[in-house]
């Protein structure tokens, strides 16, 4: 085999030792799985944000909470994202009302707890795969470096067994060892970029979810208060005062 063939990328990979080949294969598999996770998570987050925007437009268009609940289940067999939070809160509110609870101190915290539980479950699903990306991004360069060190060590050991050493003899061994480092970086860079991007997007979604849960709790609290005679009199007095235009909140 001539030198040009030996120094080709494929030729260097095939000449590598068994351990270095195993390191390269491991890094290649990590890279493939990382890209699969990145594409799958991108599609999921894009769907969640799209559903969230559509749901908020419907939620703040006015109407009745029961109608919004029916619309959610008409379009989503299993609600995800913000519709799942709303569904959990509304079902807890309905359960409390059916049980005859009317005290604000009992209903509002119960609705908030139900939405927080739903929020935790949704984020468990949204964060799936992030730990894998973080792991690949952090250890792949070191795995590649291990393959490089082992390959260079093997090259110098072989060099010590000859009488006359030359650069042409050691260069292929060093080159094939450095391929492991390159593959480690090839696996790590997309994983780190994907992890940082998705972490930022999940922070954005988390803030939107928290804002909605606060708004939903406020609507429930006002709905419970409006059932008392004192609050009805206060609402009648405030109705004559000018107010700034705002989004139309649904009624309970």
Image (cartoon, grey):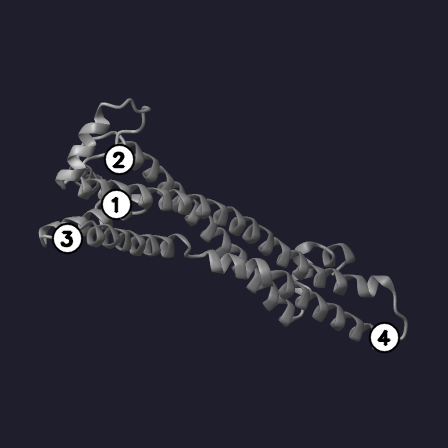
Image coordinates for residue 28, horizontal then vertical, percent:
56, 59
Compare marks 2 and 1 and give the one earlier in the sequence. Answer: 2
Work out whether residue 195 or residue 226 is closer to the camera in this orientation and state it.
Answer: 226
Residue depicted at x 66% and y 67%: 147
- Mark number, residue 27: none
Which residue matches tag 1? 86
Tell me: 235 left or right of 173: left
Q: Mark 4 or mark 3: which comes first in sequence?
A: 3
Q: Residue at x 33, y 42 (%)?
A: 212
Q: Nearer the viewer, mark 4 or mark 2?
A: 2
Residue hosting label 3: 96
Most distant residue in the right direction? 164
Question: Which of disc 3 and disc 2 is earlier in sequence?
Answer: 2
**In the figure, residue 75 lies in which quadrant?**
top left
Q: Position of residue 148 (x, y in %)?
A: 70, 65
Secondary structure, mark 1, is helix
* Element carrying mark 3: helix
C-beta proximity under 8 Å, tags 2 and 1:
yes
Relative depth, front residue between 243 and 35: 243
State the image coordinates of residue 53 (x, y, percent, origin top left): 34, 35
How many numbered marks does the figure carry?
Answer: 4
Q: Estimate the spatial distance between the alpha carbons at disc 4 and disc 3, rounded to whole Å.
A: 85 Å
User: How far apart are labels 2 and 1 at the CA level?
Assistant: 10 Å
- SS at circle 2: helix
Q: CA distance from mark 4 to mark 2?
A: 79 Å
Sooner in the amino-acid sequence: mark 1 or mark 4:
1
Label 1, residues with CA under 10 Å away: few <14, some 14-19, many ≥20: many
Cα distance in 3D space between marks 2 and 3: 22 Å
Q: Which residue is mark 2?
A: 59
| Mark 3 in CB contact with mark 1 (< 8 angstroms) | no
Which of pointers 3 and 1 indicates the residue nearer the eye?
3
Between the residue at mark 1 and the residue at mark 4, the CA separation in whole angstroms equals 75 Å
């Amino acid at each position: 085999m001539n030198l040009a063939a030996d120094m080709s990328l494929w030729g260097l990979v095939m000449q590598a030792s068994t351990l270095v080949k195993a390191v390269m294969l491991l890094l290649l598999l990590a890279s493939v799985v990382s890209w699969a996770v990145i594409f799958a998570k991108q599609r999921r987050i894009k769907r969640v944000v799209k559903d969230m925007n559509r749901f908020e437009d419907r939620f703040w268009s006015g109407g009745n909470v029961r109608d919004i609940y029916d619309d959610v289940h008409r379009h989503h067999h299993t609600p995800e994202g913000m519709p799942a939070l709303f569904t959990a809160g509304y079902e807890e509110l309905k359960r409390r009302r059916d049980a005859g609870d009317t005290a604000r101190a009992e209903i509002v915290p119960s609705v908030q707890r139900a939405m927080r539980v739903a929020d935790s479950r949704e984020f468990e699903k949204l964060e799936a795969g992030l730990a894998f990306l973080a792991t690949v991004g952090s250890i792949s360069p070191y795995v590649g470096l291990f393959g490089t060190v082992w390959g260079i060590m093997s090259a110098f050991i072989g060099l010590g067994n000859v009488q006359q050493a030359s650069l042409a003899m050691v260069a292929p061994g060093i080159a094939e060892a450095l391929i492991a480092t390159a593959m480690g970086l090839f696996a790590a860079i997309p994983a780190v970029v994907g992890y940082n991007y998705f972490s930022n997007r999940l922070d954005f979604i988390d803030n939107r979810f928290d804002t909605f849960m606060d708004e939903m709790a406020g609507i429930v609290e006002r709905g419970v208060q409006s059932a008392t005679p004192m609050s009805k009199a206060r609402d009648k007095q405030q109705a004559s005062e000018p107010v700034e235009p705002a989004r139309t909140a649904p009624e309970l």
